Image (cartoon, helix red, strand yellow):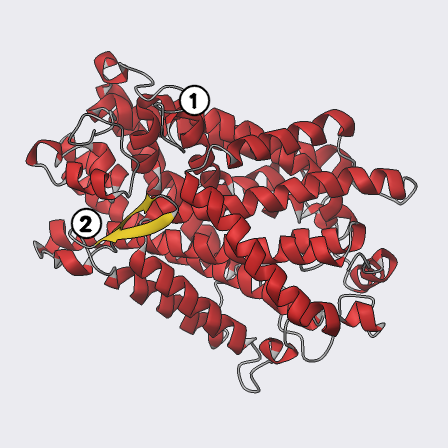
Amino acid sequence: MWRVKSLDAILATAEKKSLHRSLGPIQLTLLGVGAIIGTGIFVLTAAASQKAGPGMMLSFVIAGAVCAFAALCYSELASMVPVSGSAYTYTYAVMGELLAWMVGWALILEYAVAASAVSVGWSGYFLGMIEHALHFHWPDALRAGPAWSLNGFMPVADFSHGVVNIPAIVVALAVTSLLVIGTTESATVNAALVAIKVTALTVFVILTLPLMKSGNFTPFAPNGWFGPHGTTGMGVFGAAASIFFAYVGFDAVSTAAEETKNPQRNVPIGLIGSLGICTIFYLLVAAGAVGAIGAQPVIGAAGEAVSPGSAAFQAACGLASNADRLVCSNEALAHVLRQVNFPLAGYLLGLAANLALPSVILMMIYGQTRIFFVMARDGLLPEGLAAIHPKWKTPHIVTIATGLFVALAAAFFPVGQLADISNSGTLFAFFMVAIAVMVLRVKDPNRPRPFKTPAIWLVAPIALAGCAFLYFNLPLESILVLPIWGALGLLIYFAYGFRKSHVGKGLRGEVHELDADAPPTGLPGAE
């Protein structure tokens, strides 16, 4: 189980499909901005406000800083091993099959649950749009899943405020259908959607910043740094652990290292530049939202702090006095604009979210199926899962299975809890990447590195500490999901993958990206 996949064979495969180096620092930075900005800021502003109040502005800075250190580690491996599989492939080549399996299993959790989170976020904006434009009230039981809380270590569902999120199911299954038949966005459509997202957020900032009231920033951190005693995942650091979701996408810059001119210079510029621009943009949006209508959290019946998505939170938001609070909105930014008498702008921002967010769901489901596909091709999962449809030439079985899981999670969980669960998988994968880059520096110091992480023995440990710190500031239920999911993965690995592994059998030592039965390797959005 400590056997490694030959790095030389992986690199030989990469050489067969080497790409032209054409991207400079400006193109890389814009690529990163387009990949990062969108989902988190549209969807998680309300949940972050409930955790940290106006202090969520600091949370954006903390999460962005951790991302920057992790991104620098990620880039070195991405430039060395520019093939499908992401952190799974890197770990397989450096630390062995067992840890690679655990990373791949965590990435499956990350991508699938993230797609569910975006589906729920889209549902909020969709329902807000039809209710304000068409004056149609969607049935309460069909607009959201139940509120979840822990009774000891047992999850308990409260169906009093919602039973199932029908719009989230519909959008998840619609995107899955497009992926099964092979429909992907063109680069032109993808660029247009990025422009729509950035324009909508820019208009939001322009309209709200002049309306800021200093009193709306006090108290700045009502739940403190770590949350009130007895709570988990609250406060400024708890919000940072959630807001980490808003930065995922920076790996688009890392994985473009093979197409970059002078990657040693331009990749750090693209990474730090895009993360810096997005952080500033996020701070402006957060400042506009907080300053315009306030972002103080609601409290429970006994005056206690309550977590977003919990039954106590839903009960508090059900009170007429809290109906207009930012933290209680399912379409936070559109809600702010309507509250400050820009109803048309609020409608248009909601429309922008409805147009742009399905493309994010598509990218996340695609990414999950790609990890699934590579693991099945390595023999760690049944190869039948990697079957290619004879007509559509897509891995239809894993795509359908993923889509059903995404729809099920979106139907019954709130967006904030889904984002936290997704972050637990992401943070684990980045943690392993930071270890892998240091191990490879020791094991194979002379191997060519198109990009080398600067100050590796400082940057990588900070990335490790940052990822671990944010993980342990997630809510307890999200912390517990990762080891439970990991234990399930270990059972599957030792029951199947350990015996069937192609590397273990000596059947394959490389990633067969160019085989006739492989699906297209380009991500949706690339022509």
Left or right: 492, with 218 as reference point: right
Q: Nearer the viewer, residue 519 or 414?
A: 414
Indicate the quadrant containing the C terminus: top left, top right, bottom left or bottom right: bottom right
Residue closest to the eye, 98 or 132: 98
Q: Position of residue 451 (x, y in %)?
A: 77, 39
Relative height, residue 316 to residue 20 (above, below): above
Residue under pointer 2: 128
Query: Residue 171 location in percent, x, y?
Result: 33, 63
Q: Nearer the viewer, residue 87 or 264?
A: 87
Using the rendered image of the protein, determine whether residue 173 is visible from the camera's viewpoint: yes
Real-space CA distance between mark 2 and mark 1, rounded to the nearest whole angstrom = 28 Å
Question: Furthest residue to the bottom?
Answer: 390
Percent across and percent down for residue 224 are 37, 19
Q: Is residue 52 above or below residue 119?
A: above
Q: Going from the N terminus, do you reach mark 2 or mark 1 first?
A: 1
Residue beneath label 1, please? 58
What residue is rendered at 27% in x and 37% in y? 333
The answer to whether 522 is drawn above or below residue 27 in the figure is: below
Say left or right for 215 vs 58. left
The single residue placed furthest to the front in the displayed view is: 152
Above-or-below relation of 104 to 415: below
